[in-house]
């Protein structure tokens, strides 16, 4: 009734790769060097180097990056000094301070945040922002078109 057969051809499910979680650089940690992350990364400490992430970069309110950032989405609440390249949405929130050029698809800046540099958005005019703390000046790369008055 029961026979002993070899299970050479039995299908054993292969181990599925673990879902990539968020990498964290905790407050009080300083890293010198470039980081490549396949997934999300949260920086609450200090990074002196470049970040390349395949998804989201989150810079906490105590976080600081001295280098370039390249990712798909980004939320910045801390300090960044360097070029920021974001494929989709870049949020500069809270008391963030960003010094450097931005290249992004979409940009959202809260009034409490500060940004000094050039902003290049896909499909829009270049925006040059060189505001000092407390000042509110912004120059758009292209002048507004003049409209003929209706008679």
Image (spheres, rainbow, N blue to C red):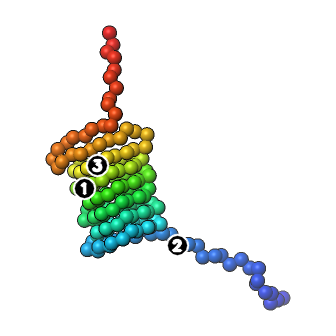
Which residue is more in the foreground, 138 or 12?
Answer: 138
Q: Position of residue 74 (x, y in %)?
A: 37, 56
**In the figure, residue 16 lies in which quadrant?**
bottom right
In the displayed structure, 25 sits above or below 145; it is below
State left or right for residue 19 relative to residue 144.
right
Q: Residues within 10 Å of mark 3 (few under 14, many from 20)?
A: some
Which of discs 3 and 2 lies nearer the camera? The answer is 3
Alpha-carbon neighbours of circle 2 within 10 Å: few (<14), some, or many (≥20)? few
Quadrant holding the C terminus:
top left
Q: Where is residue 126, by image quadrant?
A: top left
Q: Which residue is mark 3?
A: 117
> Marks 1 and 2: CB-CB under 8 Å?
no
N-terminal label among 3 and 2: 2
Instruction: Tell me the distance, in whole angstroms, between the alpha carbons under discs 3 and 2.
Output: 39 Å
Residue 18, label in figure: 2
Whether residue 94 is visible here, answered yes or no, is: no
Q: Earlier in the sequence, mark 1 or mark 2?
A: 2
Find the distance from the CA under tag 1 to the CA under tag 2. 35 Å
As drawn, the label of residue 119 is none
SS for callout 1? strand
Residue receiving disc 1: 97
Q: Is residue 6 left or right of residue 150?
A: right
Is 19 in front, or is 134?
Answer: 134
Q: Secondary structure at mark 3?
A: strand
1 vs 2, front mark: 1
Residue at the image position 32 percent from the left and 73 percent from the top = 31
Q: Residue at x 82, y 89 (%)?
A: 3
Mark before the other along the chain sequence, 1 or 3: 1
Asked if residue 34 can be seen in this view, the reply is yes
Q: Secondary structure at mark 2?
A: loop
């Amino acid at each position: 009734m029961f026979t002993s057969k070899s299970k050479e051809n039995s299908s054993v499910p292969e181990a599925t790769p673990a879902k990539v979680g968020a990498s964290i650089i905790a407050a009080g940690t300083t890293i010198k060097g470039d980081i490549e992350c396949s997934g999300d990364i949260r920086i609450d400490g200090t990074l002196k180097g470049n970040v390349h992430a395949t998804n989201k970069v989150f810079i906490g309110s105590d976080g600081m990056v001295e280098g370039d950032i390249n990712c798909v989405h980004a939320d910045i609440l801390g300090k960044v000094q360097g070029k920021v390249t974001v494929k989709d949405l870049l949020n500069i929130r809270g008391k963030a301070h960003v010094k450097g050029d931005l290249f992004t698809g979409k940009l959202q800046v809260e009034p409490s945040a500060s940004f000094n540099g050039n902003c290049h958005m896909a499909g829009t005019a270049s925006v040059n922002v060189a505001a000092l703390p407390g000042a509110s000046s912004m120059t758009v790369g292209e002048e507004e078109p003049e409209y003929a008055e209706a008679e």
